[in-house]
Amino acid sequence: FPHIMCIIITVIICIFITNQSGEIFSQGTEDIIVDYEQGQIDDYLEYRDTFFLQVESDESLSPEMANQLPVRGNADRSGRPEIVTYTVKKGDTLWSLAKSYGTDVNTIVNTNNIRNPNSLKIGQKILILTTNGVIHSVSRGESLWTISRRYNTTVDQIAWANEIKNPNALKVGQELIIPDVKPVLSQTAASSNKASVKGMNFMWPTQGKISSYFGNRKGGFHYGLDIACPYGRTIQASESGKVEFVGWLKGYGRTVLINHGGGIKTRYAHASKITVNKGENVTRGQKIAEIGNSGKSTGPHLHFEIIIDGKPRDPLNYLP
């Protein structure tokens, strides 16, 4: 009988311990599962974003595969570019409008097919893109993949700018904002653009890397093209003309200004040495100065401007 009682007591104790341990284990496991599932979600989101960014730049990826990828986007509209319909008022210029809306003159000109930047009329309605870039009208057969390749940008950038959640839902004729890119000109458009410079045949004034483009930049508007290159490298006249100014200009440093006639001039700034004189006639490709770091400059480079009818233009539109 004592043995039976011991067995019974032992069984009761075991059952009690098992029940208590089961509750503790069950509770602990539930917490672990919740944490683990959240971790899985976080890991998946991080992997998905990383994978998307990696395959997006993979040239071997087919357009069909690219269109099946998820497009990430920020639900917050703030910071995204917009297309604004603006009615021209007295005193408005393309330069003042570009500064007000955080874009550049070229973007406004290209968006509205403006041939003469000085021809704005009071009451005229124009479209203003609130960033440097272009507005692209979707054609039949195009996808975000092909459009991104056309403008040398990313699918993700276009999707974000236009709040596109489904990359396969593009419609023919749909207008897309393509931010921070330059327009892709056809051969006809390019020829027409160069012809507007009244027969000028500009050449690159020096060889180097473009360090700053024409347009808005931190601290204001940049009215020329900066070409970084070694100190002392030759600066050539971009086109034949007459030297109108030689000397020091505030901010520009040592500067040469050449008048090409017909309201067209070119400016060469930050030189270390000038090799021509005011009033001298120069030919296309002739040495006029040497690269320097004079004036407001952070390193040796050439600041090059093309000025037409008193207004600076983007040199890239006129250079070969």
Image (tube, grey):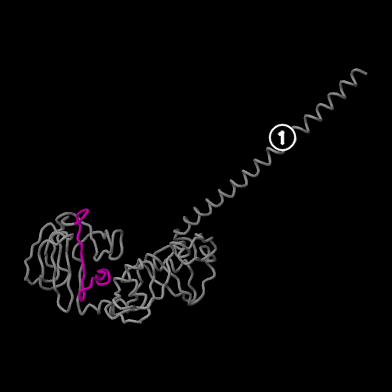
The number of numbered badges drawn on the structure is 1
Q: Residue at x 87, y 23 (%)?
A: 7
- Disc 1 residue type (three-letter): Ile
Q: Quadrant of residue 190?
A: bottom left
- Farthest residue in the top direction? 2
Residue 126 horizontal/vertical position (percent): 37, 78
Left/right of residue 64 with respect to residue 92 in the rendered view: right
State the quadrant of the C terminus.
bottom left
- Residue 135: image location, x then y, percent: 41, 72
- Give SS at disc 1: helix
Q: Which residues are magenta?
A: 296-320
Residue picked out by circle 1 = 24
Q: What residue sits 70% from the left and 38% below the top? A: 27
Residue at position x 23%, y 60% in the image: 227
State the image coordinates of residue 73 (x, y, percent, origin top left): 50, 60
> At 17% across and 79% down in the image, what residue appears?
262
- Front in this rendered view, residue 103 or 7: 103
In the image, is residue 300 part of the stretch drawn in magenta? yes
